[in-house]
Image (cartoon, rainbow, N blue to C red):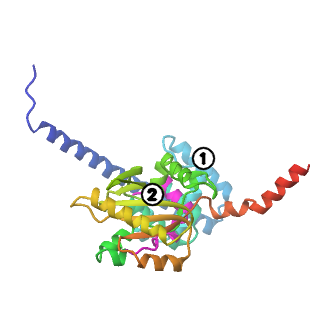
């Protein structure tokens, strides 16, 4: 038999595994940094040759082929990737610019930003948040498609009045307006239960749209209040802020009385589920449309921390391309007449 396992063996093993993971992560970051710097230098040289010697696309294509021959084990020397390197060098013309957030991202993220934005300020906005929140490439692409830069100001809430200073700003950060739910493949005629079910069926996409830190607790969460039954549409927990987030869905336009129901649910969750280490529970009402003035007056009438945001089921360009209800009726009548 071998030696007995020491009492501190498991803790030591966990410590060593964490050290290995940390070292691997650090090594990956360093490799990525060097790769990005290499690609920038290649792009800068190509850009210089094109300006000084008039290199055309044919020369760049030959350069890509020769580099692949010289370094057969390395990926990334396609003509298209060399074009991205050139665009990268054009976007960050000073070597000092390599300290910016965009240069701290993986190359795949950088190519997404280069292909989508000519405007530096917009590109930097997404790069800063991708670095800060650790967005994957797919999450970055999702936020770009959803025009996140127009929505990260947060939904209208009463947090400033209902929560303590500082806490209100923190809670505000987990909201946005509107929420883009185009991944649900539903139209505006869908009922609340269908919308709710699809959000749960596509929970990974739902969490991605809500933002970092959200964990799903349950759908139609039941509470018995003095013998009366109540059901919260969707309940989440924000693991960074340590707070429950109650979400109620309404398929129509916002009505003031809807905040009464949401405020009630927030109070129940805060009383029944919240622990002493948790921050105050907040509520978010998702509606198909809203009058900003009506929302503002309604929020002022409630003490529980609640907010109101709209949701979009289809992108604006897709909605504009679809026939209107009147047009559909005309097409249907024409087909019946035929």
Q: Is residue 21 above or below residue 263?
A: above
Q: Is residue 311 visible?
A: yes
Q: Residue at x 23, y 58 (%)?
A: 275
Q: Which residues are magenta?
A: 134-158
Q: Is residue 98 above or below residue 26?
A: below
Q: Which residue does the numbered mark 1 point to in the structure image?
A: 65
Question: At which x and y percent is residue 207?
Answer: 44, 54
Q: Earlier in the sequence, mark 1 or mark 2?
A: 2
Q: Which mark is residue 301?
A: none
Q: Residue at x 18, y 44 (%)?
A: 15
Discs 1, 2 touching: Cβ within 8 Å: no
Q: Which mark is residue 36?
A: 2
Please tell me how crowded label 1 is: few (under 14), some (14-19), or many (20+) other residues with Cα within 10 Å: some
Q: Quadrant of residue 95?
A: bottom left
Q: Is residue 153 above or below residue 66?
A: below
Q: Is residue 232 magenta?
A: no
Of badges 1 and 2, the one in the foreground is 2
Q: Quadrant of residue 322?
A: bottom right
* Apparent side of residue 309 relative to residue 160 in the rendered image (left or right): right
Please tell me how crowded label 2 is: few (under 14), some (14-19), or many (20+) other residues with Cα within 10 Å: many
In this view, the residue in front, 187 or 130, is 187
Question: At which x and y percent is residue 289?
Answer: 57, 68
For the view shown, which residue lies furthest in the top direction?
A: 1
Q: Is residue 154 magenta?
A: yes
Name the secondary structure under disc 1.
Answer: helix
Question: At which x and y percent is residue 68?
Answer: 55, 45
Q: Residue at x 83, y 58 (%)?
A: 330
């Amino acid at each position: 038999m071998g030696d007995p396992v020491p009492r501190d063996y498991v803790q030591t093993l966990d410590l060593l595994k964490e050290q290995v993971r940390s070292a691997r992560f650090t090594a990956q970051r360093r490799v990525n940094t060097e790769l990005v710097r290499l690609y920038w230098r290649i792009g800068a040289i190509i850009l210089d040759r094109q300006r000084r010697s008039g290199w055309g696309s044919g020369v760049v294509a030959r350069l890509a082929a020769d580099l692949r021959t010289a370094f057969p084990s390395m990926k990334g020397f396609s003509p298209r990737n060399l074009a991205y390197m050139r665009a990268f060098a054009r976007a960050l013309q000073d070597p000092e610019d390599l300290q910016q957030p965009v240069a701290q991202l993986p190359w795949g993220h950088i190519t997404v930003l280069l292909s989508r934005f000519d405007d530096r300020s917009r590109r930097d906005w997404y790069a800063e948040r991708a670095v800060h929140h650790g967005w994957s490439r797919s999450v970055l692409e999702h936020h770009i498609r959803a025009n996140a830069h127009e929505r990260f100001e947060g939904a209208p809430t009463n947090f400033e009045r209902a929560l303590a200073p500082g806490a209100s700003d923190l809670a505000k950060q987990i909201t946005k307006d509107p929420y883009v739910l185009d991944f649900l493949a539903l139209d505006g005629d869908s009922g609340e239960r269908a919308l709710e079910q699809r959000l749960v069926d596509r929970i990974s996409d739902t969490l991605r749209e809500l933002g970092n830190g959200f964990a799903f607790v349950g759908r139609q969460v039941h509470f018995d209040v003095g013998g009366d039954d109540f059901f919260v549409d969707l309940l989440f927990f924000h693991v960074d802020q340590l707070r429950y987030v109650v979400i109620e869905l309404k398929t129509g336009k916002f009505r003031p009385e809807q905040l009464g129901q949401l405020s009630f649910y927030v109070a129940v969750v805060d009383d029944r589920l919240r622990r002493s280490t948790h921050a105050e529970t907040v509520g978010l009402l998702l509606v198909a449309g809203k009058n900003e003035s009506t929302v503002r007056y309604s929020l002022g009438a409630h003490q529980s921390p609640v907010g109101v945001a709209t949701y979009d089921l289809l992108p604006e360009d897709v909605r504009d391309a679809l026939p209107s209800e009147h047009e559909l009726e005309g097409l249907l009548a024409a087909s019946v007449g035929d």
